[in-house]
């Protein structure tokens, strides 16, 4: 009888030991998957410190510099075309008119992209004029591209190089722009997602926005896409408070770099949230943030990544 009980006890101990081993391995595996993913190097607007922003030449240059992700912004033309552009108007700092003239800031702001067909938008050059904000920026002739054309171009480029690239695409919306820069928010979101969806790139794309309305629409209608919540420098709420107000947990919290602390990073990681700050253009600051444990960096100068 004693030998039987002893045998049962040994089996029980072995079973517990095995279960504990499996649990420990599972925890380690989860931690490894979350904590040891490749550091995400993102070229802000394609790397506008070096090339004309949000243009195909900028995206190809960023790919050549080895970034993992191309960051870009979206607007909508009058004829419903999804255009890669940060501003809903033209920017006098780098725009040349179809006649080859420059624009004053006041005149440029009156040219709303949503009031023009894409054919008209494409007549304006956005790469030849010297941009005083970015003196290192290379001057090349370029236009604001259609999202579909940009994606086709970058995908063909990385395929030829035997690489893959990811995309961080911003829906540029806010309540004050409703009915002015796009017909309605739902229509804007749908137009953008239809272009991305036709490319079959859900596994390569993150959709980001400052606008919680846009993120909530995306979460409910396009759940297969990872979402990133952009956080302005003036934000005072904690990550937990922001998520509570949003109503769901996004994949990424993307704060202005001035907001980032080790405590914030640790708090987000405990909630299985990645932290990818913007827009970090100083090498020492990038190193400091990376030491804090951020999961990636968005910068205007993708050449800085080679110096980390």
Image (cartoon, rainbow, N blue to C red):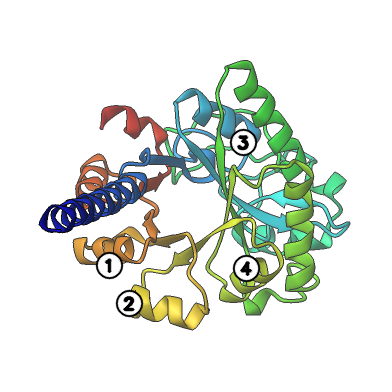
Do residues under tags 1 and 2 come within 8 Å of each other at their CB atoms? yes
User: Label 3 crowding class (10 Å Cα cut-off): few <14, some 14-19, many 20+?
Assistant: many
Question: Looking at this view, is 14 or 21 the one in front?
Answer: 14
Mark 2 or 3: the one toward you: 2
User: Label 3 belongs to which residue?
Assistant: 127
Badge 1 or badge 2: first in the primary sequence: 2
Q: CA distance from mark 4 to mark 1?
A: 22 Å
Q: CA distance from mark 2 to mark 4?
A: 21 Å
Above or below, 162 against 218 in this view is: above
SS state under label 1: helix
User: Label 4 belongs to which residue?
Assistant: 219
Badge 4 or badge 1: first in the primary sequence: 4
Name the spot of residue 179 as percent of width and height, x first.
Answer: 77, 76
Q: CA distance from mark 2 to mark 3?
A: 39 Å
Do residues under tags 2 and 4 come within 8 Å of each other at their CB atoms? no
Tag of residue 267: 1
Work out whether residue 146 can be spotted. no
Name the spot of residue 43 as percent of width and height, x first.
Answer: 47, 40
Question: Looking at this view, is 29 or 243 the one in front?
Answer: 29
Badge 2 or badge 4: first in the primary sequence: 4
Question: Which residue lies at the image location 23% right of the left edge and 48% below the top edge?
Answer: 285
Q: Tell me the quadrant of the picture where the C terminus can be found.
A: top left
Name the spot of residue 130 as percent of width and height, x first.
Answer: 53, 37
Quadrant hosting residue 262: bottom left
Mark 1 or 2: the one toward you: 1
Badge 3 or badge 4: first in the primary sequence: 3
User: Label 2 crowding class (10 Å Cα cut-off): few <14, some 14-19, many 20+?
Assistant: few
In this view, the residue farthest toward the front is: 1
Question: Which residue lies at the image location 64% right of the left edge and 79% below the top edge?
Answer: 175
Tag of residue 175: none
């Amino acid at each position: 009888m004693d030998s039987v009980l002893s045998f049962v006890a040994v089996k029980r101990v072995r079973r517990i030991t095995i279960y504990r081993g499996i649990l420990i391995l599972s925890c380690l595996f989860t931690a490894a998957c979350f904590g040891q993913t490749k550091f995400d190097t993102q070229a802000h607007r394609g790397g506008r410190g070096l090339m004309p922003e949000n243009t195909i030449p900028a995206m190809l240059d960023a790919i050549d510099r080895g970034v993992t992700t191309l960051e870009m912004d979206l607007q909508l033309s009058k004829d419903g075309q999804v255009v890669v552009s940060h501003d809903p108007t033209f920017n006098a700092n780098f725009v040349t008119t179809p006649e080859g003239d420059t624009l004053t800031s006041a005149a440029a702001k009156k040219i709303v992209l949503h009031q023009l067909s894409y054919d008209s938008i494409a007549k304006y050059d956005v790469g030849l004029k010297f941009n005083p904000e970015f003196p290192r920026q290379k001057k090349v002739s370029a236009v604001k591209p259609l999202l579909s054309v940009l994606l086709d171009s970058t995908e063909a480029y990385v395929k030829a190089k035997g690489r893959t690239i990811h995309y961080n695409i911003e829906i540029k919306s806010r309540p004050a722009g409703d009915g002015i820069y796009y017909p309605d928010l739902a229509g804007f979101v749908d137009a953008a997602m239809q272009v991305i969806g036709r490319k079959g790139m859900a596994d390569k794309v993150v959709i980001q926005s400052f606008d919680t309305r846009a993120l909530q629409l995306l979460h409910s209608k396009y759940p297969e896409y990872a979402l990133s919540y952009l956080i302005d420098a003036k934000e005072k709420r904690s990550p937990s408070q922001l998520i509570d107000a949003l109503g769901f947990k996004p994949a990424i919290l993307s704060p202005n770099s001035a907001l980032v602390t080790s405590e914030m990073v640790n708090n987000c990681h405990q909630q299985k949230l990645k932290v990818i700050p913007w827009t970090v253009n100083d090498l020492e600051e990038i190193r400091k943030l990376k030491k804090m444990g951020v999961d990636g960096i968005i910068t205007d100068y993708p050449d800085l990544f080679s110096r980390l």
